[in-house]
Image (tube, helix red, strand yellow):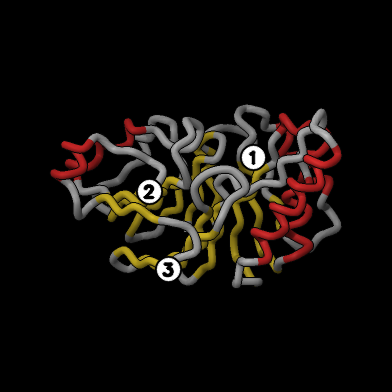
Amino acid sequence: MKVVHIYHSGILLESDEAQLFIDSVSDVDELVNFDKKVYFFATHGHGDHWDAANLKYLSRGARYILSDDIEVDQELECDNQSKIIYVAEKKDYAVENISFKTYGTTDRGVSFMIDFEGKKIFHSGDLNWWHWKNNSEESHRQEEADFKKELELIEEKNIDVAFVPVDPRLEEYYFLTAEYFVDQFQIRELFPIHFGNSFDITRKIKEKLRDNKTVIHLINDEKEIFEI
């Protein structure tokens, strides 16, 4: 399977038969291959996770799995009802040969646990330990409790690939989510996401978690390709 880090939290998972774009907000014309089945997943409607421009591929047969907080033009929606599926948290779904579960978040929308090519793949979306340095101690405790509560609900403890936020805006607390994930789950490979163009933070988290058995991927550029 091929993994392409597109930008920020955008990911492409690609097999011989299908392409799964998750939280892609960049132009992906050069990546889309309509000789395969094409799916667009979006964890929520924030502009750094969903771009309505992706709907231009509807006419080419792409399918869309969108968090139910995302609004699509009604006329476009009515013409393509079978191609757009809205999902809510804590439910099981299947679209053609792809099955997945939705979990919660600490912001908006959902997170995804996807069964793809025999692998358990988790995409956090905005499920993050939002420790904003200048917030109150009470707020910090609540952010921690909310994050840990959501992770307790994740049933799958063995995860092949996890896409986890390492947001540089959290400054020295950028690592909290990734560190807690690898502590609570058996994760084979972890890809940092939600860092914009701050690629150096992937080097920092790789060094921070160097003693863990999880493979932490270093990302150097947009649209970098990995084989897993």
Q: Which residue is mark 3?
A: 92
Residue 194's spot in the image, x, y percent?
61, 38
The answer to which image quadrant residue 137 occupies is: top right
> Separation of disc 3 and disc 2 at Cα?
14 Å
Classify 10 Å Cα crowding around label 2: few (below 14), some (14-19), many (20 and above). Answer: many
Answer with mark 2 or mark 1, whichever residue precedes in sequence: 2
Q: Which residue is mark 2?
A: 66
In the image shown, does 9 or 222 lie closer to the viewer?
9
Tell whether label 1 touches label 2 (CB within 8 Å).
no
Residue found at x 72% / y 32%:
168
The answer to which image quadrant residue 150 occupies is: bottom right
**Total marks drawn?**
3
In the image shown, does 1 or 121 lie closer to the viewer?
121
Residue found at x 45% / y 53%:
13
Q: Which residue is mark 1?
A: 219
Q: Relative to 23, is 87 above or below?
A: below
Q: Amino acid at mark 1?
A: Ile
